[in-house]
């Protein structure tokens, strides 16, 4: 642990986070090269194993080959394990291990966890990590139990139902989106119960751990003065609003395209499911290549925004999007302060949202140009869809990822990595420490847009 | 003029600007429906005439039909007249007319002009407008003289050389980009003199009138304490940097594509010319449909940024882009104030750049989705290229505009209009007056990206 300690002491917390993610990918890579991981006769290149490792640690689920044809049962168990690690978060798991061995968490480690989950209060971090793991496993167990009982009608024996129940629950809750059958949820395109359970599990994983913890505190009714944080209010409202908006837009566009011939309820559930899933899960109940290009672009937008901070999702995150929208509305109204839910948004958070959005747009633009050159057989819509899917750690695909060139694979790995780490952490990690300006120049106005 | 006065008194300056542009389009529309404007036997729909009017007033140059087959010489003269009006700007021309008839310019009119050209000093507005017209016409005359003398070698007689000299000069200086021959500058793809003259004229039109005026003051050496404004420094530096960057990227991408087989100097000039032209002129020396998709996307990015404020160009403008970049760099460095050229950027200008960029990206996204639905035969790259070309009032085309559906035409007109007016003016005009916040809520941090 000398190396780790050294990182902790020297680097900024953000640099340490990025380093830890690197280490997690390295460990996952080793796990995926263990003997017996592949099916007999399958040989995977090192680059492809690395791609799978990055995709699994970042809970994205994009793959360069067919999982069921490549990995043995042991390999799939390894993948599920990596997904679980990715979902819980390297930092919280590390803390959990420390807790198990009875080690006290020092200030420095607390800070690290704090940064990873973007919490601003230092107290209660140990408690927090315990809660994260407890909540996640509870959700997964309940999900697995419900799905297993329901799946008994579909399968020959209890073992198979249990296997699919457990896999389905972990896949949905971690928003992993890995497709081990090659069918995702297509067999359930008319089973609304399975879809509702999946949407619930996806949402619980993507809504952000702070929301779950606050919700639990609220429901347990221990604290009479309990108040939901501004973060919880904003992210939940945004998550919900984008869910409704996404359902509405997909339904409108596809009513005369892919949903033609469907009953109204099947169309409605298809729209709802893909509105939820595009935000980070990547599960599908239909062949997404059948959707129209307008929907592809719209879903790219949803994937680009992604899920809540401190959740299993990626993208620019709900709060970034919400603050941008609130800022716009306020600016148009000529107000100076952004007021929402009886609170004021701190100006530094407006700055951060600006930085994240500009960088994310620039990244998508540059990645698009590179892939247009390295993937001559791909269409622009495929490239944009695949890029936003990687950045939003969603994992939906129009089929391009399987045919990527080596450079294309590297670009996609970078996008998944940055999408998972978060642009702000990534930026700070390459930037270094803040310096205070020592002197001031006269201010001068310029002409804008 | 009762209507105009009424607008002036009631509306905010921004609303008045937008109203004036509306009136200019209406007048242009009427001019383009005059008898004798079309060639014999040509019948143009009202929508198509309106499209041409919007395209000409906004100095974009996108057309839904072949200009040379549709308009008579009289019609083309009308088009040049509208271009000229569009370039000088409705407000400055209006002021010029007032000057001619000896009417004093009131405070209200001064404010209007001030807003149109984004000048923050009220004094010297009359002088400013005089200067704008004087400078523009001087540039056009010099350009026309140089081109005419040079064209004598190409044409049978002086009259023809003169005609092409005048048209070429106005087309380049106003950044009009209208193609009355169907060939743009393709015949001159190896005539570097014509290309250099065109690039110079384009740049003089697109660099912004304040820059030209300051340059003139500086060169005339009347004022010993003269200092270039921060605006001039930023916009010139950005314009130049993007020119070099654009040349470099286009050259790199196309060396193995469209420029293959060209001499190094022809490739170099092709890259330079299209780097300059994409920013607002829209003139071309080669068939742009031959460029690779990576270049298409990159040129869409250049068109999206556009030219300087207070120039004949559109887009988000150089200063918006520059401030976003400066803000990013500062944020990564952990500095609070943006310092550049020994001056500090005002925070309100950072806010404005945020608003303009977010709105512009949202606009392109929504327009893309609409056109994907209304133009089923268009590719995504065509749609993005055409949309950014309209918003940047550039006028380059991959061929889609000629085949647009009526809804597509309306969307493109809106984009040209907003691109010309500028998003900030447009936003203020629909927003209303600013209100001061009366009370404060407690500030609370949230988690960002
Ligand atoms: K995923
Ligand atoms: K133009």
Image (cartoon, coloured by chain):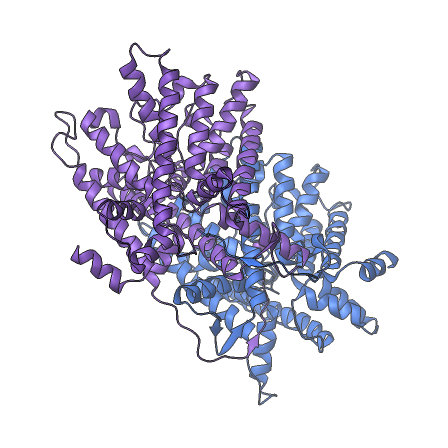
Chain colours: A blue, B purple
Q: Nearer the viewer, residue A329 or A59?
A: A329
Toward the viewer: A210 or B318?
A: B318
Q: Is residue B139 above or below residue A82?
A: above
Total count of labels? 0
Percent of width and height locating residue A332: 40, 64
Quarter of the displayed picture in which ligand 2 can be seen: top left
- Horizontal and vertical percent for residue B395? 36, 35
Q: Which residue is at the far bottom?
A: A224
Q: Nearer the viewer, residue B275 or A102?
A: B275
Q: Is residue B160 visible?
A: yes
Q: How far from the left and from the top, in percent, is residue B126?
A: 34, 50
The residue sitting at 45% across, 37% down in the picture is B279
* A409 versus A252 height, above or below: above
Locate residue B187, reporting x and y percent.
39, 17
| Quadrant of the image occupied by residue B427 | bottom left
Q: Is residue A209 left or right of residue B438?
A: right
Residue A229 in view in this figure: no
User: Which part of the image, by quadrant, shows the N terminus of chain A?
Assistant: bottom right
In the picture shown, does residue A260 fall above or below A145? Answer: above
Q: Quadrant of residue B253?
A: top right
């Amino acid at each position: 642990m000398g190396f780790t300690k050294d990182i902790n002491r020297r680097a900024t917390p953000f640099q340490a986070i990025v380093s830890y993610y690197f280490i997690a990918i390295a460990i996952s890579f080793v796990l995926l090269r263990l003997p017996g991981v592949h099916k007999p006769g399958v040989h995977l290149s090192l680059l492809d194993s690395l791609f799978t490792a990055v995709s699994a640690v970042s809970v994205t689920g994009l793959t360069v080959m067919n999982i069921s044809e490549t990995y043995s049962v042991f390999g799939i168990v390894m993948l599920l394990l990596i997904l679980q690690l990715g979902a819980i978060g390297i930092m919280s798991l590390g803390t959990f291990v420390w807790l198990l061995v009875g080690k006290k968490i020092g200030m420095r480690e607390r800070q690290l966890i704090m940064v990873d989950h973007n919490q601003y209060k230092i107290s209660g971090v140990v408690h927090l990590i315990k809660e994260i793991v407890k909540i996640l496993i509870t959700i997964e167990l309940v999900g697995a139990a419900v799905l297993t009982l329901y799946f008994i009608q579909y399968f020959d024996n209890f073992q198979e139902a249990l296997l699919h129940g457990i896999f389905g629950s972990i896949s949905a809750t971690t928003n992993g989106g890995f497709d081990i059958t090659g069918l995702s949820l297509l067999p359930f395109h008319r089973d609304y119960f399975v879809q509702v359970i999946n949407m619930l599990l996806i949402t619980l994983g993507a809504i952000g751990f702070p929301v779950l913890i606050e919700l639990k505190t609220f429901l347990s009714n221990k604290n009479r003065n309990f108040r939901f944080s501004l973060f919880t209010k904003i992210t939940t409202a945004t998550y919900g609003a984008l869910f409704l908006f996404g359902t509405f837009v997909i339904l409108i566009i596809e009513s005369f395209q892919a949903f033609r011939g469907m009953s109204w309820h099947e169309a409605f559930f298809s729209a709802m499911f893909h509105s939820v899933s595009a935000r980070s899960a990547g599960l599908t109940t239909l062949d997404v290549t059948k959707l129209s290009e307008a929907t592809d672009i719209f879903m790219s937008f949803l994937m680009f925004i992604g899920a809540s901070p401190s959740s299993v999702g990626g993208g620019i995150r709900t709060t970034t999007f919400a603050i941008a929208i609130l800022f716009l509305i306020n600016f148009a109204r000529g107000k100076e302060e952004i007021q929402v839910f009886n609170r004021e948004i701190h100006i530094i958070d407006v700055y951060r949202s600006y930085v994240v959005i500009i960088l994310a747009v620039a990244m998508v633009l540059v990645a698009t140009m590179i892939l247009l050159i390295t993937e001559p057989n791909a269409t622009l819509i495929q490239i944009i869809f695949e890029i936003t899917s990687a950045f939003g750690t969603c994992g939906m695909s129009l089929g391009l990822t399987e045919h990527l060139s080596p450079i294309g694979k590297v670009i996609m790995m970078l996008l998944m990595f940055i999408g998972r780490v978060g642009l702000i952490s990534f930026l700070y990690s390459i930037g270094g420490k803040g310096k205070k300006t020592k002197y001031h120049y006269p201010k001068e106005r310029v002409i804008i847009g």
